Amino acid sequence: MKLSRPVSWFLLAFGVWSWIIWITFVKNLVKDASGLAFDDAGDPTGYFWVHLLLAVVSFVLGTVVGLIGLRGVRALRGNSQPTPES
């Protein structure tokens, strides 16, 4: 299956975007002072674990989607080079 140039770049950008967004989210989750992520004793709550799981799944999916886009971009670059004539 061949991906078009716009689709390949979109998938690559989506993978990068996913990492940027979820890294920021995890940093904010760890620094949470509202009492949602950590109880009074400083132990993680269910809210923390659920959102950490969402972040990990999003990291994995963002990585997979980004790698598919990267492979598409590389394949298109390889096809755009002129072929040597015999």
Image (spheres, rainbow, N blue to C red):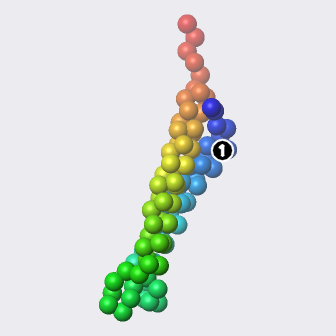
Query: In the rendered view, does 51 fall on the left or right side of 40?
Result: right
Residue type beneath disc 1: Val
Q: Quadrant of residue 69?
A: top right
Judge by depth and name the residue closer to the eye, 81 or 28: 28
Depicted 15 relative to depicted 20: above or below: above
At horizontal 58% and vertical 55% (from top left) the residue drawn is 14
Q: Which residue is mark 1?
A: 7
* Count of picture labels: 1
Depicted 16 relative to depicted 47: above or below: above
At horizontal 66% and vertical 44% (from top left) the residue drawn is 7
Indicate the quadrant containing the N terminus: top left, top right, bottom left or bottom right.
top right
Query: In the rendered view, does 79 fall on the left or right side of 22?
Result: right
Indicate the quadrant containing the C terminus: top left, top right, bottom left or bottom right.
top right
Residue 78 percent across, percent down from the top left:
55, 29
Residue 75 percent across, percent down from the top left:
56, 32
- Does dot 1 land on a helix, a strand or a loop? helix
Whether residue 32 is visible: yes
Q: Residue furthest bottom?
A: 40
At horizontal 44% and vertical 78% (from top left) the residue drawn is 46
Residue 2 percent across, percent down from the top left:
63, 33
Whether residue 31 is visible: no
Q: Residue furthest top?
A: 86
Q: Quadrant of residue 76?
A: top right
